[in-house]
Image: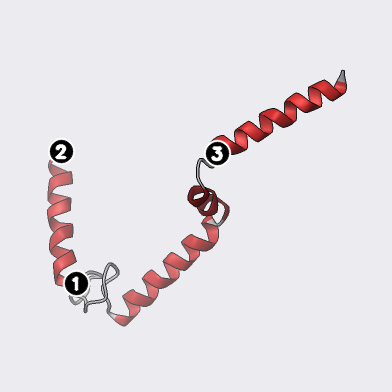
Amino acid sequence: MFKKILKKLKEVKERKKEKAYPNRFLKFYHLNKKKLNKERRFSYNERKKSGVCVRCKKKTVKGIVFCQYHQEKQKTYNKISRSK
């Protein structure tokens, strides 16, 4: 009796694992989320300190973390999202 119940519980656990990670890339991301976010924050801060655009490698506009091109893109994005 108990063996059947344990077997069913194991099957349910296996199905949940499959649903949680539909592909290997998402599985890797979820298993390494803390490390990846730490690396991203570190590189963002390093680029910000050195005066390099955080989205590309061009020089930034003074006092902003974006280059001229990305600053313009951000302005248009903000204008569109605020009008909604």
Residue at 50% across, 45% down:
23
Secondary element type, mark 2: loop
| Residue 16 image point, x, y percent | 61, 33
- Taking the view exactly as shown, the residue that stands out farthest to the front is 23
Task: Report, in whole angstroms, how far the alpha carbon at label 2 lies from the one at label 1.
Answer: 26 Å
- Taking the view exactly as shown, the residue that stands out farthest to the top is 1
Name the one closer to the observer, 2 or 56.
2
Residue at the disc numbered 2: 84
Specify the amino acid type for callout 3. Answer: Ala
Counting residues from the start of the chain, the first of labels 2 and 1 encountered is 1
Q: Which mark is residue 3?
A: none
Name the one closer to the observer, 40 or 2.
2
Q: Which mark is residue 20?
A: 3
Task: Report, in whole angstroms, how far the alpha carbon at label 3 lies from the one at label 2.
Answer: 34 Å
| Residue 63 image point, x, y percent | 22, 74
> Looking at the image, is 19 positioned above or below residue 65?
above
Specify the amino acid type for callout 2. Answer: Lys
Secondary element type, mark 1: loop
Residue at 18% across, 65% down:
70
Counting residues from the start of the chain, the first of labels 3 and 2 encountered is 3
Mark 2 burial class by Cα count in 10 Å: few <14, some 14-19, many 20+ = few
Residue at the disc numbered 1: 67
Query: Which picture quadrant has residue 54?
Result: bottom left
Q: In the rendered view, does 81 fall on the left or right side of 13? A: left
| Residue 65 image point, x, y percent | 26, 70
Counting residues from the start of the chain, the first of labels 1 and 3 encountered is 3
